[in-house]
Amino acid sequence: MAWFFADDSITTEYYTVTGEDAAHISRSLRMKVGEKLTLCTPDGKRHECRITLLTHDEVTVRVISSTVCEQEPDVKVSLYIALMKGDKIDDVVQKAVELGVYEITPFLSARCISRPDSKSMTKKIARWQKIADNAAQQSRRGILPKVNPCIDLRDIPKDVEDTDTTVVFYECGGEKLKAIIPEKSRSVALITGAEGGFEQEEIDLLRDSGVRVATLGKRILRAQTAPIAALCATMLLTGNLE
């Protein structure tokens, strides 16, 4: 069944889809009146709907049934990824959303080679959000994970103050992840570095702020591989890959 996201909670029997989604339903999918689709809302519900009226710009549906969306993990994982060269982050965003990430925040660290100006950064964030939206739709997520504006590594400790567990993955070693993340974790933040890894001073700053330092094994992973490996491991340890 086709899967879409509504901007607001659905409180009435009928709802109208507009914009790109309406065009996709009518032009790309060529759906017809009477066909069914699913709408997910920000309040965590999924609504099974039937199309009642369809034009090129608007699609009106009637809500048949509404239930709690069960696609979402029971742990909110925030992924902090250092900026990388080229389009490497594109794939990281896509795969992270498929695996259940809650939000993604790019950051600048000492060894980041990519340092776009504000105009270029704004365009990158918009592109990554579009990739996240498409991945969420394809993988039938219950929410649209947000790609946040880029921050500096030094701002991460303040950003994760309300997170239960925060972990930075260091290429020079650290604790085993299973010793850090409890099975019943409610919120976890994962921090991975750029192509050149982290400076020791950066690790010290994060550790002094309460961030746990972990390892992803004896092998050195590429910058674009580490966040996906860390996210997979976290989902497995919290029972969200079962």
Image: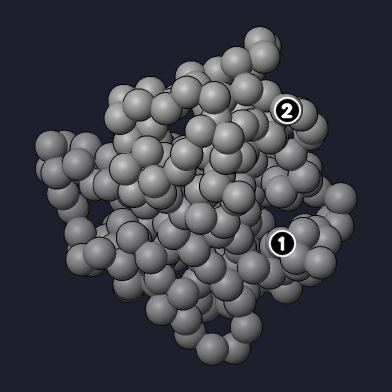
Amino acid bearing label 1: Met
For disc 1, the neighbor class at 10 Å (few under 14, some 14 to 19, many from 20) is many
Q: Quadrant of residue 152?
A: top left
Which quadrant is the C terminus positioned in?
bottom right
Picture layout, residue 232 above or below residue 55: below
Tell me which residue sits at (66%, 10%) in the image.
Answer: 12
Give the mark nearest the N terminus, 2 or 1: 2
Q: Quadrant of residue 142?
A: top right
Q: CA distance from mark 2 to mark 1?
A: 33 Å
Secondary structure under tag 2 reads strand
Q: Position of residue 239 (x, y in %)?
A: 82, 61
Q: Residue drawn at (73%, 27%), measured in percent from left and top? A: 64
SS for callout 1:
helix
Q: Measured along the vertical axis of the image, is residue 126 above or below residue 219? A: above
Residue 179 versus residue 236: which sits nearer the camera? 236
Q: Which residue is mark 1?
A: 235
Residue sitting farthest toward the top: 12
Residue 71 picture location, percent across and down: 71, 48
**Residue 208: x %, y % from top left:** 59, 48
Which residue in the structure is indicated by mark 2?
Answer: 64
In this rendering, position of residue 171 left or right of residue 14: left
**Residue pictured at 64% horizontal, 31% vertical:** 49
**Which of these two is toward me, 226 or 152?**
226
Q: Name the residue located 20 percent from the left edge and 59 percent from the top edge.
A: 114
Residue type at numbered disc 2: Ile
**In front: 230, or 207?**
230
Residue 49 in the image: above or below residue 223 = above
